[in-house]
């Protein structure tokens, strides 16, 4: 097993191994005595994995309840949030009890946000089951839901107490859902590690999955340890996300998060080079690796449409927006741009 330690406002471990779900009860017992645990998951993950997690928890003395919602980004809403909070109250979950987020980024984000506000905050554990959630969303404590007006506009920083990453769960992922996570892995390579980027570009990710997960979460851990509340360095993790979120939203979430980020990374690198914000063009290398994993690289929307959505992005600060500019593979910088220049900038990247 690989263990990565996070030392943010809360210290916790990320445990990475094959076939860990059956040990959930024991692993949780290592940090908390048996209590009531509410498993929050979606209908697809429920059908594959909730039984194993629930049985293991019960065997270790936890009493369990389960809340299942329909899979997909449209469930990451205020409505689902309210429904889950009512369920937690009906289960009489107390501050000494526990929430378990079992699933992809949608489950992790909404379950984590419930944990942050229910009774003004209770403990929660992340059990990621998509590649994206394993390498990104389960770590770092960003939780939240979408509004009609945009992605992740309501949320809180709330760290999990433990992350149990059983990568054997990735075997049941549809190819395009796995690829969605690859986009985030490529992101880590571009912002912080040429070595990781080359590993992804030159090998088959699946053949070295444990190592890749560990490298990605270690990069995220370092960034979160330095800037947990997203005031500086952590914004580098948004590479490709400003435009990505617009594409995701404009497509009505038919284009998934990772696929949208893939396109966003291509647009931002091309525009950065063409506008003179950097003097090396990373775009061809990024496009090559994304195409290798069947990820999209071209926006179906024009600059005006993307700009209109970007204006409501939470990364906007007054009249400026912070963009992540790749200087070379493995090194990005933050750049503040006046919002009225963004539309022309996006056009350069299309
Ligand atoms: N909090 C963060 O730091 C952070 C970071 C990146 C992304 N996100 C968020 O993560 C979300 C995307 O996450 P995602 O890509 O995991 O999507 P997701 O949670 O919607 O999962 C994608 C699909 O895969 C299914 N699935 C999950 N695990 C499975 C498995 N093991 N086998 C078969 N099917 C499985 C789900 O039911 C769903 O249909 C977005 O909402 C994004 O905003 C959050």
Image (cartoon, helix red, strand yellow):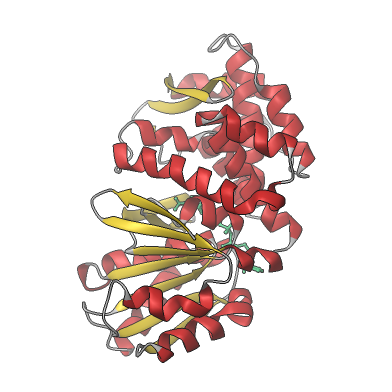
Query: Is 205 left, or right, of 33 in this rendering?
Result: right
Query: Is 53 left, or right, of 157 in this rendering?
Result: right
Q: Quadrant of residue 42?
A: bottom right
Number of marks in picture: 0
Q: Position of residue 157 (x, y in %)?
A: 31, 53
Residue at 33% x, 50% y is: 6
Q: Position of residue 310 (x, y in %)?
A: 51, 36
Q: Which quadrant would the C terminus be assigned to in this image? A: top right
Residue 255 visible in rendering: no
Q: Nearer the viewer, residue 54 or 80?
A: 54
Residue at 28% x, 85% y is: 35
Q: Quadrant of residue 290?
A: top right
Q: Nearer the viewer, residue 229 or 208?
A: 208
Q: Position of residue 216 (x, y in %)?
A: 52, 44
Q: Nearer the viewer, residue 307 or 167?
A: 167
Q: Quadrant of ligand 1?
A: bottom right
Residue 5 visible in rendering: yes
Q: Position of residue 19 (x, y in %)?
A: 58, 71
Query: Is 159 left, or right, of 316 in this rendering?
Result: left
Residue at 29% x, 85% y is: 34
């Amino acid at each position: 097993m690989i263990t990565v330690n996070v030392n943010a406002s809360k210290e916790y471990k990320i445990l990475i191994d094959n076939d860990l779900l059956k040990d959930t009860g024991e692993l949780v017992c290592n940090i908390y005595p048996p209590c009531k645990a509410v498993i929050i998951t979606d209908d697809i993950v429920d059908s594959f994995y909730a039984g194993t997690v629930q049985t293991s928890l019960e065997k270790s003395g936890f009493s369990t309840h389960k809340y299942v919602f329909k899979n997909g980004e449209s469930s990451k809403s205020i409505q689902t949030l309210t429904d889950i909070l009512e369920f937690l109250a009906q289960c009489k979950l107390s501050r000494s009890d526990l929430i378990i987020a079992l699933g992809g980024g949608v489950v992790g984000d909404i379950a984590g946000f419930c944990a942050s506000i229910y009774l003004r905050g209770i403990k929660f554990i992340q059990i990621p089951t998509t590649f994206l959630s394993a390498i990104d969303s389960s770590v770092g404590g960003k939780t939240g839901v979408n509004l009609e007006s945009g992605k992740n506009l309501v949320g809180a920083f709330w760290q999990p107490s433990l992350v149990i990453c059983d990568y054997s769960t990735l075997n049941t992922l549809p190819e395009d859902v796995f690829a969605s996570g690859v986009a985030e892995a490529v992101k880590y390579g571009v912002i912080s590690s040429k070595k990781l980027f080359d590993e992804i570009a030159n090998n088959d990710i699946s053949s070295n999955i444990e190592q890749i997960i560990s490298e990605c979460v270690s990069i995220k851990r370092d960034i979160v340890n330095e800037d947990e509340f997203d005031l500086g360095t952590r914004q580098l993790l948004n590479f490709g996300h400003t435009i990505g979120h617009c594409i995701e939203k404009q497509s009505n979430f038919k284009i998934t998060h990772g696929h949208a980020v893939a396109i966003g990374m291509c647009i931002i690198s091309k525009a950065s080079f063409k506008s003179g914000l950097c003097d090396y063009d990373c775009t061809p290398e990024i496009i090559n690796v994304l195409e290798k994993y069947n990820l999209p690289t071209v926006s179906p929307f024009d600059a005006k449409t993307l700009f209109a959505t970007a204006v409501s992005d939470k990364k906007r600060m007054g009249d400026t927006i912070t963009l992540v500019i790749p200087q070379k593979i493995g090194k990005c910088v933050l750049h503040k741009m006046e919002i009225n220049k963004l539309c022309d900038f996006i056009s350069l990247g299309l």
